Image: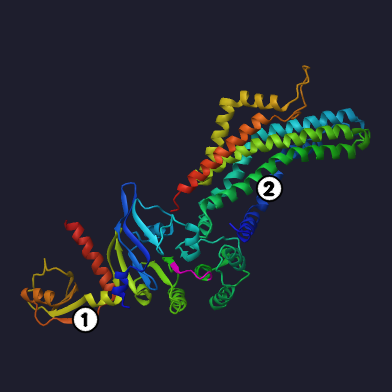
Amino acid sequence: MNREILKAMFWKEWRETRWKWLAFAFAFHLPLLFVGLSVALRDEWRFDLLAMSDGVTAMALGFAVVVQSIFLITAGLFLLAFFAVGSVGAELENQSIFFLLERPVRRWQVLLFKYGVGAVQATTCVGLSILSTVTVVYVVMAAAATNVTLAGSREAFSYALMNGARGTVWTAFIALVVYSATFLFSVLFEKWWIAVIAGGISIAGMFYYFGAMLFEWIINRATRNTGDDEVNLDLYGQLDPVPMLLMLAASAALYLAAQYAFARKEMR
Amino acid sequence: MNRESEYARGDYAVETRELWRRFGKFEAVRGVDLRVLRGTVFGLLGVNGAGKSTIIKMIVGHLRPTSGEIKVLGRTLAEDPTEMRERVAYVSENRYLYEWMTVEESIRFTRAFHRAWDDQKAAELLKRFGLPGDKKVRQLSRGNRARLCLLLALSFNPELIILDEPTSGLDPIVRRDFIENIVAEISDEGKTVLFSSHIVDEVERVADCVGIINDGELLMTSSLEEIKASYKRVRYAANGARPELSGVPGVLAVENGRHEQVLTVRGWGDELLGALRERGVRDPELLPISLEDIFVNTVRAERERRAAG
């Protein structure tokens, strides 16, 4: 595949998915929107921003990370399934993929390109949402609360930002596994809604059978042990390569399975 | 070099041997041996559902044969599919295009894939076809979509152009225009064209060679001249008792008039003439025969043969 082809394919993917990317990036910030609207519209939810201290900033940022993570690991995964299905399933369903398959490129190259672009879109939508949430919460607090100063809360923000950055890595890996699984389904089933249902059932099944154990394991790996009994908001305190490598291996296996299925797929 | 010797030499753009394709228990293609000589226009003629598209999809690699062998431009598709797609253009009945692209974007996008893309030719065809460059594909009429597909297929100078029901869904004027464009394009460039259609006069107008397919089986394949030389319509007076012609080899169809009978026969010659005379046919007169007569009667005879046996 030469540079011209790469450029053309990238242009096509970008033109086809740019609005979807934007829509999903927006959708992955829904908790922020809900919290913002609740605070703005309900008197009893409103807190005194003027009285907030720097110490509260750290707590609020920690909460933001946890809430956003809970959203990502539940509803976010289903959103992701929708996202992944569109990257190849839509082209299979409306058969526009024939246009590419009639060009002098190999099938595996077409699929690799679609997987690559989709994976980058999915992981950035999911992963960066933690960082952007932390940033938005901090900027709002710093701007609105007189007791929270940029100088005084910078340390808390940096700390939350570092956790957020590690959280980006963690969620990007989790997103990659879910994306890869749904990508495989979208290659196996030509109807996008069957792929979404299959993806949804898999995610629900994963929650049902492995949920508590798996997520506890990942959260334990991602959370620095503070040794006290309080609610630990220090999520993503550390990066552990073992689960990440396992998730990477699972993603690679799912991607290879998709390649295998696509190579044998007949275009009727 | 005449066509018979070319066949003997085996200089084929497309060659299939004992090609079978089953979908579950349904046999869509049954033992097809298709040979398309280089530099010719080959029309694959058959009714809807006869198996034309299945054969073509196997040739271009979208479907895998259940058994049999396919060679395109002397090589199997598995040998080098990308090289093959540089040399073979395929326009399908469904005219796959990206709806959101404009005509110019479609051309630019396709151009990136083909080393042999000819900008001048693309510009000429764009002008000749009168395609609006700034219009989105989804806004194009069926005729213009077909023309755009043809433009994209011809602009990278393929050696072999495969068209699967290219005029399907087009009105007669656009259809004729489309066929004339193909003829204009290929007449002096020595390209090979394999196209399928169920419209007989379309095939008759363009094809050098014809294959008739029915229920997945290739009933006959030959040059149009040879077919017309071999198939005849024979008329003779038939007042009163009519000759019993069942069992006469080569008689495909018998049409009864009030005072005459008209036969469609295959393999016209002294032997058949003798057999007809033995059955009481007197003073037979040869009538002009169209490809449609040949097609309809060949398919009908095959169906009757199957029903009988």
Whether residue A189 is visible, yes or no, is no
> B176 and B85: which one is in front?
B85
As drawn, B100 above or below A108: below
Q: Confirm or deny contact between disc 2 and disc 1 (CB under 8 A).
A: no
**Coordinates of residue B109 in the picture (x, y in percent):** 60, 63
Kindly state the secondary structure of the residue where label 2 is placed.
helix
Instruction: Tell me the element at label 1.
Output: strand
Task: Judge whether A192 appears above or below B32 on screen.
Answer: above
Badge 2 and badge 1 in a common chain: no
Dot 2 surroundings within 10 Å: few (below 14), some, or many (20 or more)?
few
Dot 2 corresponds to which residue?
A23
Q: Residue at x 19, y 57 (%)?
A: B307
Graded by Cα atoms within 10 Å as few (under 14), some (14 to 19) or many (20 or more), the crowding at tag 1 reads: few
Q: Is residue B63 left or right of residue A96?
A: left
Residue A107 vs residue A65, the one in the foreground: A107
Tell me: residue B229, above or below residue A219.
below
Quadrant where the image shows the C terminus of chain B: bottom left
Amino acid type at circle 2 is Ala
The residue under the point 59% across, 47% down is A115
Range shown magenta: B155-161
Instruction: Tell me the residue that label 1 is attached to.
Output: B287
